[in-house]
Image (tube, grey):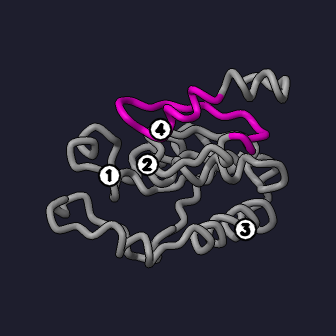
Amino acid sequence: MGCLYCRTSCEISAQEHCSKILIQGRLADSIAKAGYLVVLPDLFKGDAIPLQTPERGLNLTEWFSRHPTAEIDSIIESTIKYIRTELGSKKVGGVGYCLGGKYVPRFLAEGKGLDAGFIAHPSNLELLEIQAIAHPISMAAGGMSSLQVACAELPLMRSRTRRRF
């Protein structure tokens, strides 16, 4: 199984949360040590916000404008295609933290390329993205995160789709 690890580990969330999340490649290294192929695409083309950046003065609106959803989608699509065609993986899973937690569910929709996923502390996750999930996913969140929307929606999704979550 190939593993697409959306390494955004917390570059855009509050500093107090950053200390609680595994820094960058540690989880990817752990997955690789377990014998899985791990691919870490650069979703921000070298423009990730360093963890040491003080929150004060950080202009997330301007930063987000440089990284539109369609552009990140394109990077993930080409990465999944590369994993399947060039590296020969039959199954591809995704792991995403923070902003990466938005993109794993998007690619768990039917025909989008991921076979299973795990997200934690997702940011900017929208209800339609949650409703489109067609493959197994595990979710973890604490405090006020966009995953609370998912938790409220899951019983309704179960009754409408007869899928287990």
72 shown above or below 21: below
Q: Position of residue 72 (x, y in %)?
A: 57, 68
Going by the numbered disc 2, the residue's amino acid type is Cys
Q: Measure how far apart labels 3 and 1 are at the Cα level.
A: 29 Å
Question: Is 149 contained in the magenta span?
Answer: yes
Going by the numbered disc 4, the residue's amino acid type is Ala
Give the structural element (helix, strand or loop) at label 2.
loop
Going by the numbered disc 3, the residue's amino acid type is Tyr
Q: Is residue 127 left or right of residue 140?
A: right
Q: Measure how far apart labels 1 and 4 are at the Cα level.
A: 13 Å
Which of the two discs, 1 and 4, sits closer to the camera?
A: 1
Quadrant for the N terminus in the image: top right
Q: Nearer the viewer, residue 91 or 19?
A: 19
Characterize the local packing of mark 3: few (<14), some (14-19) or many (20 or more) Cα atoms within 10 angstroms: some
Q: Measure how far apart labels 2 and 4 are at the Cα level.
A: 7 Å
- Disc 3 marks which residue? 82
In percent of the image, x 74 and y 29: which residue is there?
157
In percent of the image, x 25 and y 58: which residue is there?
51
| Badge 2 vs badge 4, beta-carbon distance below 8 Å | no
Q: Nearer the viewer, residue 24 or 76?
A: 76
- Disc 1 marks which residue? 13
Going by the numbered disc 1, the residue's amino acid type is Ser
Which tag, 3 or 1, sits closer to the chain's start?
Answer: 1
